[in-house]
Structures are given as structure tokens and as C-alpha cells.
Amino acid sequence: MWLFKYELEMSYPAIGKVFGGRNHTTVMHAINKVDSLTKKDTKLKQKINHIKIHFQKRLSPLPKKLIN
């Protein structure tokens, strides 16, 4: 969810739909939780950055229209 929000700039309701119809507040909570944890845990932040890099590499060949 965090990647969908920050990398794809999707809305909370749109992310919720992608994740099985989750409520937007559930999505907000999940994203805020990751934000909070990464401020405290440098290893987690490194892992997320690693995933983010792979995510970006996978998306880069796709047309912008498909992503947004």
C-alpha cells in the first residue's frame, strides 16, 4: 500500500480497491504505520528502499497512462 501511495500517487480509496476492497481508513492506517516504523527502524527503511528500487525498475518500461 505504501508503494502505491508514494510511487504511483494513488488515492486511499483506489488503493483500498486494489487490495480487496479495503476501506480508505484502513489504507491510511497501514501507510501511516509504515511511515512511523521507518522513522524508528533503519533496517526496515533500507528494506523498503530496496523494494522501492525494484518496484521502480519494473514500472519504468510501462507507459505512464497504464501506471496512472
Image (cartoon, rainbow, N blue to C red):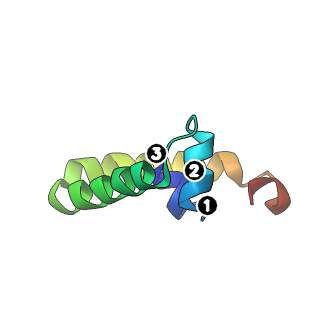
- Camera-nearest residue between 3 and 29: 29
The residue lying furthest to the top in this view is: 20
Numbered tag placed on residue 53 in the rendering: none
The residue singled out by tag 1 in the image is 10
The residue singled out by tag 3 in the image is 51
The residue singled out by tag 2 in the image is 15
How crowded is the residue under tag 3: few (<14 C-alpha within 10 Å), some, or many (20+)?
few
N-term mark: 3 or 2: 2
Tag 1 and tag 2, C-beta contact below 8 Å:
yes
For marks 1 and 3, give the CA distance: 18 Å
N-term mark: 1 or 2: 1
Vertical placement of residue 4 versus 39, above or below: above
Identity, as a three-letter code, of the amino acid under mark 2: Ile
Name the image quarter holding residue 19.
Answer: top right
Residue occupying image coordinates x 59% and y 62%:
11
Quadrant for the C terminus, please: bottom right
Q: Count of labels shown?
A: 3
Identity, as a three-letter code, of the amino acid under mark 1: Met
Vertical placement of residue 21 versus 24, above or below: above
Residue occupying image coordinates x 34% and y 45%:
47
Numbered disc 3: secondary structure: helix
Identity, as a three-letter code, of the amino acid under mark 3: Ile
* Left or right, 51 with reference to 42: right
Numbered disc 2: secondary structure: helix
Numbered disc in front, either 3 or 2: 2
* Left or right, 40 with reference to 38: left
N-term mark: 1 or 3: 1
